[in-house]
């Protein structure tokens, strides 16, 4: 008699997609209520009704989960440390080039513009993104700057980059919106270099 039992299904176990979705939903709620710094992987896992190991399995770190939950289009917390560790006299130019080349990718630009528009003036998104950038990016930038005003100069780097992205990709101000990446690197790179090491 032949075996009529149903064949075993391959892939993720049943309920894996549900768990992942519950974790993202819980992360959105937790970040919204407690901000980036006030939320933990443990608290998000508890809200989702899963073990914190499962959160790490699906998303890795809290920064990874945040990026997934709010749709961060690029990961400067991962890429920028390598730029900062490169030749010191090239950091400003390399930083501008990295950001612009990422934003020239259509999907990054689309999601980035949406995030910038959602962030401006939002009581929920503004502190979330600010917390993420402060903890995961500005602290890393400040760590390579010498002097007591390292935090201020890291903030100036962020303001320059934020203003550049807003003017070029959201407001699309001419002729900045039409300028080549190379031209902008030549103009803006030295300014970032001065903020970082001047």
Image (cartoon, helix red, strand yellow):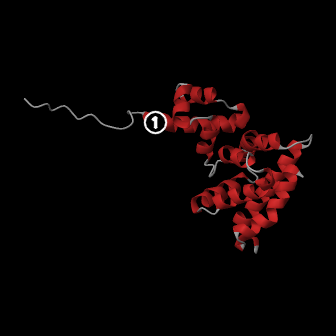
Q: Left of 198 or right of it: where is 108?
A: left
- Residue 172 seen in the figure: no
Q: Residue at x 82, y 52 (%)?
A: 157
Q: Residue at x 75, y 43 (%)?
A: 127
Q: Residue at x 73, y 56 (%)?
A: 94
Image coordinates of residue 135 in percent, x first then y, are 75, 38
Q: Left of 28 or right of it: where is 84?
A: right
Q: Residue 4 lies in what quarter of the image?
A: top left
Q: Total label count?
A: 1
**Which residue is outermost to the right?**
148
Which of the two residues, 146 or 38, is positioned nearer the viewer here? 146
Residue 190 sits above or below residue 63 on the image: below
Image coordinates of residue 91 in percent, x first then y, are 77, 53
- Density class for disc 1 (Cα within 10 Å; few <14, some 14-19, many ≥20) is few
Image coordinates of residue 53 in percent, x first then y, are 54, 26
Residue that label 1 marks: 18
Q: Left of 37 or right of it: where is 55?
A: left
């Amino acid at each position: 008699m032949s075996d009529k039992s149903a064949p075993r299904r391959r892939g993720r176990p049943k309920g894996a997609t549900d768990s992942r979705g519950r974790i993202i939903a819980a992360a959105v709620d937790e970040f919204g209520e407690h901000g980036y710094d006030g939320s933990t992987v443990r608290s998000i896992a508890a809200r989702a009704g899963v073990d914190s190991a499962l959160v790490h399995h699906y998303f890795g770190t809290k920064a990874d989960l945040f990026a997934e939950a709010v749709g961060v289009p690029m990961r400067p917390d991962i890429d920028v440390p390598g730029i900062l560790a490169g030749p010191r006299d090239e950091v400003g130019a390399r930083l501008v080039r990295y950001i612009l080349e990422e934003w020239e990718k259509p999907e990054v630009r689309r999601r980035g513009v949406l995030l910038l528009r959602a962030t401006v003036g939002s009581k929920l998104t503004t502190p979330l993104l600010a917390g993420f950038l402060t903890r995961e990016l500005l602290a890393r930038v400040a760590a390579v700057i010498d002097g007591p005003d390292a935090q201020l100069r890291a903030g100036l780097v962020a303001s320059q980059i934020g203003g550049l992205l807003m003017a070029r990709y959201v407001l699309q101000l001419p002729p900045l919106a039409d300028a080549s990446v190379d031209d902008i690197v030549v103009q803006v790179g030295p300014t970032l270099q001065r903020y970082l090491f001047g």
